[in-house]
Image (cartoon, rainbow, N blue to C red):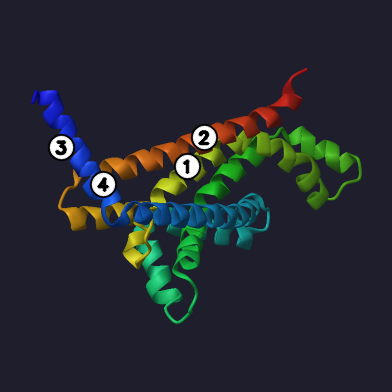
Amino acid sequence: MTGLQTWWAGFCADFYSSFIREDRYMLLLEGIGVTIKVSLLAILIGIVIGVVVALCNVSRFKPFKIIGGIYTDIIRGTPSVTQLMFIYFVIFASVHWEKWIIAAIAFGINSGAYVSEIIRAGILSVDHGQTEAGRSLGLNAYQTMSRIVIPQAVKNIFPALCNEFIVLIKETAIVGYVGLMDIQKAGDFIKSATYKPVMPLFGTAVIYYVLIKLLTLALRQVEKRLRRSDIR
């Protein structure tokens, strides 16, 4: 056998051992489902928290700004894995919820700090004259913010929010610390069972890449739709 044939035979054998034997591919399929569930719920929670904190940070009411600043500093200043373990093993230790929901809450709280800064920057990027125009038309502060400022800010911050979602998907690879079988944990399990690290690591990398690539393409289409109104 030539060197290429030997390599191919070894590749096929490793592939079969890692993914086909004992239906180990099912672990990866389960992991994909867990990763998607955690990421989707986390980004929704993160957006809600981010909007509230961003409004606190741009508020003229000083206590709100202090609360928003403290939250942002603490979350951005501590590792996400520490936050995940603290929320799971301390805050929700006596709550009998499903693990993936608690993990999603932890990642949502983490993401909220970064989303809040993205939203705050988007709000500040809207010309102040837009706010003055809204108030001159008789709109109150809430109506001006929700009907004039926020819609314009969304277009400016959408690419950054998409990037945060992509980063969040990759960050969920640490949910194995609380016993969840996500993509990375499934790869680690296969690696431990086969004593062959290359193929499981390669497989998990490919899965993450495909997921993120599909998400990127979908979000680009959404962004194009948002930008259509800018074309005159």
Tell me, yes or no, whether the two marked residues, 2 and 1, touch with CB atoms within 8 Å.
yes
Q: Residue 135, can we see it?
A: yes
Disc 4 marks which amino acid?
Answer: Pro
Q: Earlier in the sequence, mark 1 or mark 4?
A: 1
For the residue labelled by badge 3, is the local secondary structure a helix, a strand or a loop? Answer: helix
Residue bearing mark 4? 200
| Residue 125 falls left or right of residue 165 | right
Residue bearing mark 1? 166
CA distance for labels 1 and 4: 22 Å
For the residues carrying marks 2 and 4, which lies nearer the camera in this image?
4
Q: Nearer the viewer, residue 159 or 191?
A: 191
For the residues carrying marks 3 and 4, which lies nearer the camera in this image?
3
CA distance for labels 3 and 4: 14 Å
Q: Residue at x 52, y 56 (%)?
A: 42
Tell me, yes or no, whether the two marked residues, 3 and 1, touch with CB atoms within 8 Å.
no
Q: Position of residue 226 (x, y in %)?
A: 69, 32
Q: Residue at x 20, y 43 (%)?
A: 14
Q: Position of residue 214 (x, y in %)?
A: 50, 36
Disc 2 marks which amino acid?
Answer: Thr
Q: Earlier in the sequence, mark 3 or mark 2?
A: 3
Tell me, yes or no, whether the two marked residues, 2 and 4, touch with CB atoms within 8 Å.
no
Q: Residue at x 49, y 57 (%)?
A: 38
Q: Earlier in the sequence, mark 3 or mark 4?
A: 3
CA distance for labels 2 and 1: 8 Å
Disc 3 marks which amino acid?
Answer: Gly
For the residue labelled by badge 2, is the local secondary structure a helix, a strand or a loop? Answer: helix
CA distance for labels 3 and 2: 34 Å
For the residues carrying marks 1 and 4, which lies nearer the camera in this image?
4
